[in-house]
Structure formats: C-alpha cells, structure tokens
Image (cartoon, rainbow, N blue to C red):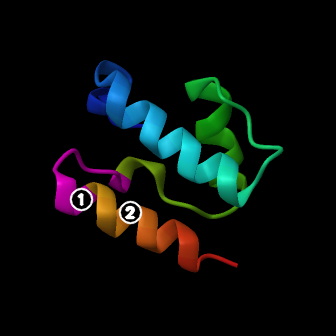
C-alpha cells in the first residue's frame, strides 16, 4: 500500500472506515488490510493521495462486488 497511506493518519482512517463500512470483517492493521484487499482483487497500490485520488479509489471500492 502507498507509503503515503501509512504516513497520513487522516487518510488512513478514511480509507479504513470506507473499507470497514463495506466489509465489517476487514482487518484494521495496514499489512493485514493489504492482503485482505488483494484477496478481493482490489489493487491497493493504486491508492493515490490527492482528494481526487481518494474519491476515485473509494468509488472503485464501492463498485466492487
């Protein structure tokens, strides 16, 4: 996962909250979360750091079935 995700607490909390809303069983530790998303075929390295990147990634996540 992007180093920026690890560095930015507000960003990390926002992404984790979105993931937990979609999958309540998702882990909250970054390393476990990376594997959880990869297991669901979500490209975690594609998460950018700008507001537009976050919104696009969240939309992609929400669109995943």
33 up-or-down from 19: above or below: above
Please provide percent x and percent y for residue 60: 46, 72
Secondary structure of the residue carrying numbered label 1:
helix
From the viewer's perspective, tell me whether residue 42 is left or right of residue 24: left
| Residue linked to disc 2 | 57
Q: Nearer the viewer, residue 19 or 41?
A: 19
Neighbor class of circle 1 (other Cα within 10 Å; few <14, some 14-19, many 20+) is: few
Marks 2 & 1, CB-CB < 8 Å contact: yes
Q: Where on the picture, by quarter, is residue 46?
A: bottom left
Please provide percent x and percent y for residue 43: 48, 58
Residue displayed at 30% across by 27% down: 3
Residue displayed at 66% across by 40% down: 35
> Could you say which disc has been placed on residue 9 in the image?
none
Residue displayed at 75% across by 54% down: 23
Q: Where on the picture, by quarter, is residue 59?
A: bottom left
7 up-or-down from 44: above or below: above
Q: CA distance from mark 2 to mark 1?
A: 6 Å
Whether residue 49 is in magenta: the answer is yes
Please provide percent x and percent y for residue 24: 79, 48
Q: Name the quadrant of the C terminus.
A: bottom right
Q: Magenta stretch?
A: 46-53
From the viewer's perspective, tell me whether residue 51 is left or right of residue 27: left
Please provide percent x and percent y for residue 62: 56, 71
Secondary structure of the residue carrying numbered label 2:
helix
| Residue linked to disc 1 | 53
How many marks are shown on the rendered structure? 2
Whether residue 31 is in magenta: the answer is no
Neighbor class of circle 2 (other Cα within 10 Å; few <14, some 14-19, many 20+) is: many
Q: Residue furthest right?
A: 25
Q: Where on the picture, by quarter, is residue 36?
A: top right
3 up-or-down from 48: above or below: above
């Amino acid at each position: 996962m992007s180093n920026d995700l690890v560095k930015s607490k507000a960003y990390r909390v926002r992404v984790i909250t979105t993931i937990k809303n979609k999958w309540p069983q998702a882990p909250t530790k970054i390393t476990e979360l990376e594997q959880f998303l990869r297991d669901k075929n979500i490209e975690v390295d594609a998460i950018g750091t700008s507001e537009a990147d976050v919104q696009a990634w969240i939309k992609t996540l929400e669109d995943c079935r």
